[in-house]
Image: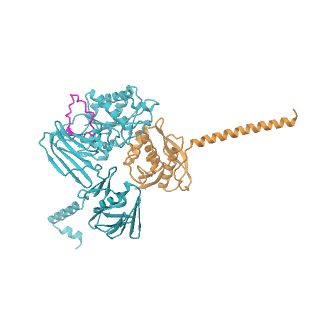
Chain colours: A orange, B cyan
Amino acid sequence: MNRALTLATALLLAAVVAMGVYLHTLRRNERERAQHVPDSRPISAPVAGPASRVTFYLAYDDPGVVRAQEASIALPADPAQRGREILHALLGEYVKRPSSHELPAGADVKDVFLVNGNTAVVDTTPALAQGHRSGVFVETLTIVSLVKTLTTNLPGVTRVKILVDGRERETLAGHADLECFYDVVTVEQLLQQLR
Amino acid sequence: MPWSRHWRETNGAGRAAVVAILLLVLVASGPSAEEKQLSIYGPRVSYSLPVSEHNGQDYVALLEALEPFGNVSAGADGNRWKLRFKHLEAEFRQGTNLGKVAGQKFGLPAPFVLEGNRGLVPLRALPAILALMLATKTDYHEAARRLFLGGAATRFTTDLREGGLSVRFSAPVNPLISTEPGRLKMTFARDPVVANAYILRLENPLVSSITFSENNGRAELAVQGKVPLLAQFAAGGRTIDIVPAPRQSQSTPPAAAPETATAAVAVPPPLTLQALTARPPFLVMLDAGHGGDDRGALLSETLEEKGVTLAFARRLRSELQSRGISAVMSRDADVTVPVEQRAAMADAARVALFVSLHAASQGRGVRVYAAMINSATGKPGGFVPWDTAQAGHVLTSRALADIVKAELSQHEIPSMELSAPLKPLNNVAATAIAIEVAPSGADVGSVNAGVYQQRIAAAIAEAIVVGRSRVEAER
């Protein structure tokens, strides 16, 4: 076998291997894209501000716990807007697939209002309640995750009220009370049971 | 003379008179009367609208009146207001009485009012406008502000028989049942219940009179009792039986509750000092979650939560009764019972224990809940706030939840105990827990399996027997 033929064979083999790697990468990317449900939530205005460390309290349906997890996200200076961005990021963890605690596409926070410095009113999108799975436990996990994440990252907020599309709603999805104010003490007690 | 000086110089009697006048003014300008509303009953839809007053006349928003019947839109152009409903139009001008409805000239009894983009028509004109726009006949009870469309009406008959009174309706009804000492009241807000206003006086050992009345968009049927009464729904909500409340005895096991009983509300007899100080019997209310229009969670393609909770409640009732514990159910059929009415029923019946029953497709085993509320520091007095009625009882509720969890573990049923913001636990002025039954394994259908439910019911009934003394001690 002359030298030129050897070189050509080696080049062809290298090309085959490279092509194989490329095909494998393409297949993996496609698989990941198929698993990812498009985020149909409205695109929020870009946030200007330095990246800050925040603590999410993430719900896990299995084994039924809520765990703290640190993250770094860009946050504005205004406390109400910070609250909105934090919850927006938290719910983003739940609307993507797979998720530890799946929430429907479009579930998001429209606004957060701070009243008297200690009360936060969270206005959520209709999709959050309308598409939420129904059940005492699964609804309780959502409430605890939202309230604990907000009160931990906005010191001074001790009560949280949750609205749906600007209105009071009786329950989240048939069980969890949305007519009450959630106070940080009772939510903390419940969190202890969910760790 | 400055007011403060004048006040100081006024004698005691004068000051008392001023205070009395101020109090009178305050009372007169106190909480306003109930807001006016109009109820509209159609063959398929019933709803209420707020009524506002303009120049001494009652008005309603025309667009809101038509919205439940299909696509409707409206807009103002200067002082002209135009409404489009399906292919028909209505047009009015601010401040004038003459307009057009469905191509015909239409005279209003009072001027049309435009509030922003909202067009308000005099209430008295609404029946005729709806008759033209919907091409249907109307029947308006003006004094009660109740408007019936297309012959919608639910009539009833009463049948006094031995052991009770039956009220039979021509269609299923879902009244709000409330109680006062010696009186049971059914309020129909969404049901087109009609009758000639009457009072029926009876020579009967149970019921002394039945009164029908209608006012402010609602109808009311009041039963005056001579003994404590229970209301029981039957025939899929077409019949309400008024029967004497069973006399509970701790030593005698109760007879099995009739299968048709639902929404049972005990009407306490007129209160006496003795009755107030006596401890009521140990009675458990089993609240089968959801029902009727509210199906609860869809556990699988064919399994609805409301059916699972009802089946489980019946099993638990049977298990309790076999252990000599009296149990009533908040519903015993597929009927809608508003969630707050369930707590009101428990409070009115002065139950010792309220058990709310739910089912889920997620997780395994049983979850036991107590209310998510801070405990009250002291024992509450005669009246307790509705929103925090559970606060004085939550420690006992948690203790009982502990006992239930322990008993489930003994029966080798996986369980979890925690608090939850579940309605209506916070409104129950007694020991209250909730049970959420999840499947036993991967098969969601197992949540409705008889053997599985029976094991759980037996464990919970046993726990209630064990925890009874704790609950009794708190009462």
Q: Is residue B234 magenta?
A: no
Q: Is residue A60 above or below residue B193?
A: above
Q: Quadrant of residue B131?
A: bottom left
Q: Is residue A9 toward the left or the right of residue B211 in the image? A: right
Q: Main secondary structure of the magenta part?
A: loop
Front-most of B270 and B204? B204
Residue B27 pos. (x, y %): 21, 60
Q: Is residue A18 above or below residue B120?
A: above
Q: Is residue B248 magenta?
A: yes
- Answer yes or no: is residue A181 visible: yes
Front-most of B377 and B164? B164
Residue B389 pos. (x, y %): 29, 44
Residue B156 pos. (x, y %): 23, 45
Q: Which quadrant is the N terminus of chain B positioned in?
A: bottom left
The residue at the far left in this view is B203
Point out the stretch of residues depicted in magenta.
B242-266
Q: Which quadrant is the C terminus of chain B positioned in?
A: top left
- Answer yes or no: is residue B365 visible: no
Front-most of B276 and B358? B358
Q: Is residue B241 toward the left or the right of residue B359 in the image? A: left
Q: Residue at x 37, y 28 (%)?
A: B450
Q: Is residue B415 above or below residue A66?
A: above
Q: Is residue B15 toward the left or the right of residue B416 in the image? A: left
The residue at the far right in this view is A2
Q: Quadrant of residue B392?
A: top left
Q: Is residue B260 toward the left or the right of residue B15 in the image? A: right
Q: Residue at x 51, y 52 (%)?
A: A85
Counting the numbered discs, the total is 0
Residue A146 pos. (x, y %): 45, 46
Front-most of B5 and B289? B289
